[in-house]
Image (cartoon, helix red, strand yellow):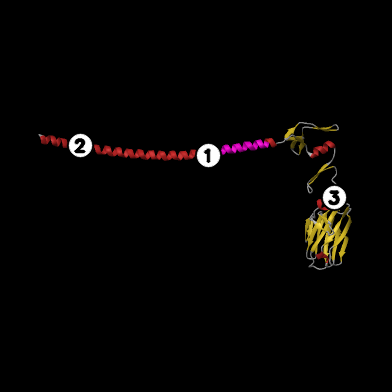
């Protein structure tokens, strides 16, 4: 009887053991899976935090950009000119509102930092005085543009023949005579020249012509050619020292004027200075 009980107990224990092993294995597998999922969630959470951090930085940068733009807008507003409806009047001639400049409607008067501005040509219209702009001089004129002045401030050579030309370079004529208005023309190979477009606008040119020492060692011909015709010729005979000449030219009805230099030797080179040149 005892043997039978023992056998029964043994069978029960064996059965319980066989049933318990799969449950424990399954439980261990579930824990590992949960741990793996938990780690994956933590990694994903860390990535999301980095993305949020990056987005926060972008938002901060955008806010800074907006702040800077707001500052720029305020600066533009503070520096902007304000159109005025104020009337502009002179001896019964009254202007106001806008006027047409091509296809653009332009305010007649503007206020900028408390100062009123109006276009130069509108002032001319009001005063009934002609206005003009000389782009080459970058100068606005009321009335007729003056036709007298330093030639080197008014005209540049339109053609240069085998020369380099410096305009309004300081030129020393000796004896304390120094000029900073005129043309310094360096030539080589025994010849050179420069041509000006007078366009029949002028009547007279005066100035001083100087040939450097290197040029006058051998005879040299200096000529002014008006409209393609020889007009005036100077000749240096060759000496040890510079040569200075006073130039007076009648340029009435002259369209093109050339200053040319020609040596007696093709190896001649030097500098010809035309200084203090007044044109009227």
Ranked by sequence position, the earlier of labels 3 and 1 is 1
Q: Are marks 3 and 1 in contact (CB under 8 Å)?
A: no
Q: Which residue is mark 1?
A: 57
- Residue occupying the far left of the picture: 1
Indicate the position of residue 158 as horizontal and vertical percent values. 79, 55
Name the front one of labels 3 and 2. Answer: 3
- Kindly tell me whether residue 120 is visible in this rendering: yes
Q: Does the segment drawn in magenta span residue 60? A: yes
Q: Residue under circle 3?
A: 149
Callout 2 environment at 10 Å: few (<14), some (14 to 19), or many (20+)? few
- Nearer to the camera, 222 or 197: 222
**155 relative position to 21: left or right:** right
Image quarter for residue 229?
A: bottom right
Q: Position of residue 202 (x, y in %)?
A: 87, 51
The reply, left or right, for residue 274 in relation to residue 53 is right
Pointer 2 or 1: first along the chain: 2
**Does residue 230 appear in the picture of this structure?**
no
Q: Residues within 10 Å of mark 1 (few under 14, many from 20)?
A: few
Which quadrant would residue 17 be assigned to in this image?
top left
Magenta segment? 56-76
Which quarter shows the N terminus? Answer: top left
Relative depth, front residue between 97 and 24: 24
Spatial CA distance of label 2 from label 1 is 64 Å
- Counting residues from the start of the chain, the first of labels 3 and 2 encountered is 2
Which residue matches tag 2? 15
Q: Where does the image place residue 275, in percent across and percent down from the top left?
A: 83, 56
Q: CA distance from mark 3 to mark 2?
A: 128 Å
């Amino acid at each position: 009887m005892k043997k039978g009980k023992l056998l029964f107990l043994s069978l029960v224990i064996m059965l319980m053991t066989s049933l318990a092993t799969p449950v424990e294995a399954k439980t261990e597998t579930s824990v590992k899976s949960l741990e793996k999922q938990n780690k994956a969630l933590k990694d994903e959470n860390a990535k999301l935090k980095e993305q949020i951090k990056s987005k926060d930085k972008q938002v901060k940068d955008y806010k800074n950009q907006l702040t800077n733009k707001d500052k720029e807008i305020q600066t533009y507003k503070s520096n902007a000119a304000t159109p005025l409806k104020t009337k502009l009047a002179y001896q019964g001639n009254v202007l106001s509102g806008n006027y047409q400049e091509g296809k653009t409607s332009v305010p007649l008067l503007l206020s900028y930092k408390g100062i009123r501005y109006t276009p130069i040509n509108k002032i001319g219209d009001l005063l009934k005085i002609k206005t003009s702009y000389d782009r080459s001089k970058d100068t606005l004129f009321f009335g007729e543009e003056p036709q007298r002045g330093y030639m080197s401030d008014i005209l540049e050579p339109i053609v240069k023949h085998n020369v380099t030309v410096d305009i309004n370079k300081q030129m020393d004529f000796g004896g304390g005579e120094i000029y900073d208005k005129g043309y310094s023309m360096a030539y080589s190979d025994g010849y050179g020249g420069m041509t000006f477009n007078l366009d029949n606008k002028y009547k007279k040119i005066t100035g001083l012509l100087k040939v450097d020492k290197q040029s006058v060692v051998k005879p040299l011909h200096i000529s002014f050619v008006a409209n393609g015709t020889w007009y005036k010729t100077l000749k240096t005979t060759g000496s040890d020292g510079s040569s200075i000449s006073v130039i007076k030219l009648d340029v009435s009805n002259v369209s093109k004027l050339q200053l040319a230099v020609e040596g007696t030797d093709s190896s001649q080179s030097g500098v010809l200075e035309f200084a203090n040149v007044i044109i009227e």
